Image (cartoon, helix red, strand yellow):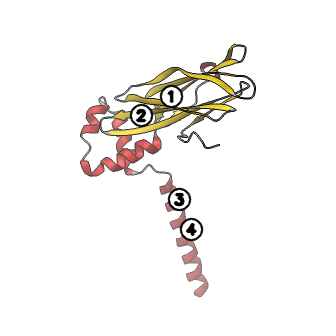
C-alpha cells in the first residue's frame, strides 16, 4: 500500500511539473492584449481602449517583446571612403510578434591614423514607424577613447501611450576596424 501511495505521489508530481512547464511557454496577459492590438484594423484605437489597470502589463510586454530583426548583410554598408577614412551604415527593423513596425538606421563616418581617431561625424541617422507606431530619435552621443570613436543613437518607438527605446552603437577604430552593438546604451562598456 505504501508503495502504491508513493507511485501515485510521483505520478502527481510529474503531471504537475509537465503542466507548469507548458504554461511557461504561453504568453502573459500583457502579451496577449498586445497581440490583439497588433491584429486589429486600427492599432492606435485598440491601444486607447485598454483599461488603465492593464496598461502597465501591456507596456512591459512591448518593452520585452519588441525586438530588432536581423537584416541581410547586403543592407549593411562598411567601406573606406579615402585613405585613412571609413564609414559604417547600420540598418535594422524592429518587429513585434512577427510584424515589422518600423526601420532604424545610423551611420558613423571617421578617420584615423592607425593609432588614434583623428575626426568623426554622424552620417545618416533616423527611424520610421508603421502599424500605429511612431519613432523619434535623440541626439547622438559620442565617446572618443583614443583608439576608437563610439557613436550612440537612441530610438524610441511609441504606440499611443506605450513606448520602447533601443540604443545602437557603432564603434570605429583608428585603423578601420569597426563593430556594432544594439541594445547597449553604455559607451564605455566593452
Left or right? Give the position of 130 relative to 109.
left
**Mark found first going from the N terminus, 2 or 3:** 3
Q: Which residue is mark 4?
A: 14
Q: What is the secondary structure assignment of the residue under circle 1?
A: strand
Observer-side mark, 4 or 2, equals 2
**Mark found first going from the N terminus, 3 or 1:** 3
Q: Position of residue 57 (x, y in %)?
A: 36, 50
Q: Tell me if label 4 and label 3 are in contact, CB under 8 Å.
A: no
Q: Tell me if label 4 and label 2 are in contact, CB under 8 Å.
A: no
> Along the line of sight, which residue is nearer the eye, 166 or 37?
166
Quadrant (top left, top right, bottom left, bottom right) of the N terminus: bottom right
Residue found at x 73% / y 14%: 83
Please indicate, yes or no, whether residue 11 appears anywhere in the rendered image. yes
Q: Real-space Cα distance between discs 4 and 2?
A: 45 Å
Residue found at x 60% / y 42%: 188
Observer-side mark, 2 or 1, equals 2
Q: What is the secondary structure assignment of the residue under circle 3?
A: helix
Q: Which residue is mark 1?
A: 93
Q: Real-space Cα distance between discs 4 and 1?
A: 42 Å
Q: Which residue is mark 3?
A: 21
**Mark found first going from the N terminus, 2 or 1:** 1
Which image quadrant is residue 49 in? top left
Amino acid at each position: 500500500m505504501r508503495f502504491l501511495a508513493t507511485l501515485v505521489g510521483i505520478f502527481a508530481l510529474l503531471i504537475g511539473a509537465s503542466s507548469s512547464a507548458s504554461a511557461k511557454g504561453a504568453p502573459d496577459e500583457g502579451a496577449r492584449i498586445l497581440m490583439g492590438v497588433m491584429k486589429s484594423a486600427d492599432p492606435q484605437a485598440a491601444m486607447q481602449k485598454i483599461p488603465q489597470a492593464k496598461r502597465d502589463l501591456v507596456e512591459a510586454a512591448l518593452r520585452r517583446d519588441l525586438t530588432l530583426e536581423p537584416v541581410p548583410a547586403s543592407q549593411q554598408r562598411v567601406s573606406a571612403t579615402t585613405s585613412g577614412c571609413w564609414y559604417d551604415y547600420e540598418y535594422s527593423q524592429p518587429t513585434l510578434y512577427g510584424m515589422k513596425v518600423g526601420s532604424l538606421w545610423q551611420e558613423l563616418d571617421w578617420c584615423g591614423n592607425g593609432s588614434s581617431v583623428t575626426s568623426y561625424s554622424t552620417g545618416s541617422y533616423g527611424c520610421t514607424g508603421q502599424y500605429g507606431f511612431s519613432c523619434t530619435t535623440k541626439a547622438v552621443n559620442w565617446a572618443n577613447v583614443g583608439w576608437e570613436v563610439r557613436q550612440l543613437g537612441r530610438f524610441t518607438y511609441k504606440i499611443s501611450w506605450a513606448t520602447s527605446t533601443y540604443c545602437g552603437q557603432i564603434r570605429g577604430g583608428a585603423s578601420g576596424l569597426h563593430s556594432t552593438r544594439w541594445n547597449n546604451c553604455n559607451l564605455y562598456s566593452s
